[in-house]
Amino acid sequence: MMKRRSGAHEKAVREIEAGLRSLSRGLRLLARGVTATSAVGRVVSPRRVTPALRLQGRYMGLIRTLPVRKKSRVMALRASKGVHEAIRLARELRA
């Protein structure tokens, strides 16, 4: 037969559990702060990906896999008509 814990023991267990939850939360916040700082100690904010940067990445990713002749066609089209048309052509040439 199990004995019931006395009220003092139950209270102590609840306080320990609450303390562990608080400690766990504090450690998570500390870890987040440590990973966000650089070697010199300043906070590094995550870089926002602008639409122009995303478009440039899409273009670079497509053109990287093309052979030299197709790549030169896409680059010439980009110079004359813009990135959107160059991406469209690079997708067609990739297939």
Image: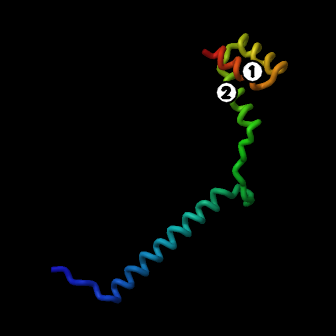
Q: Which mark is residue 86?
A: 1
Give above or below for 72 relative to 40.
Answer: above
Three-letter amino acid code at disc 1?
Ala
Circle 1 residues within 10 Å: few <14, some 14–19, many ≥20: many
Circle 2 residues within 10 Å: few <14, some 14–19, many ≥20: few
Query: Quadrant location of residue 41?
Result: bottom right
Provide the secondary structure element on which disc 1 rests: helix
Give above or below for 92 relative to 22.
Answer: above
**Residue at 77% across, 25% down:** 83
**Residue at 83% across, 20% down:** 79
Query: Quadrant location of residue 93?
Result: top right
Provide the secondary structure element on which disc 2 rests: helix
Give above or below for 6 relative to 75.
Answer: below
Three-letter amino acid code at disc 2?
Gly
Q: Which mark is residue 61?
A: 2
Q: Quadrant of the N terminus?
A: bottom left
Q: Earlier in the sequence, mark 1 or mark 2?
A: 2
**Residue at 76% across, 14% down:** 72
**Residue at 42% across, 75% down:** 17
Marks 1 and 2: which is nearer the front?
A: 1
Residue 13 location, x and y as percent?
37, 80
Residue 3 location, x and y as percent?
21, 83
Residue extending furthest top? 69
Query: Quadrant location of residue 59?
Result: top right
Residue 15 location, x and y as percent?
43, 81
Residue extending furthest left? 1
Residue 26 location, x and y as percent?
56, 69
Closest to the observer, 31 or 72? 72
Give above or below for 37 relative to 54.
Answer: below
Q: Quadrant of the C terminus?
A: top right
Q: Do the numbered discs 1 and 2 sit on residues whose CB atoms are within 8 Å? A: no
In the image, is 89 to the left or to the right of 26?
right
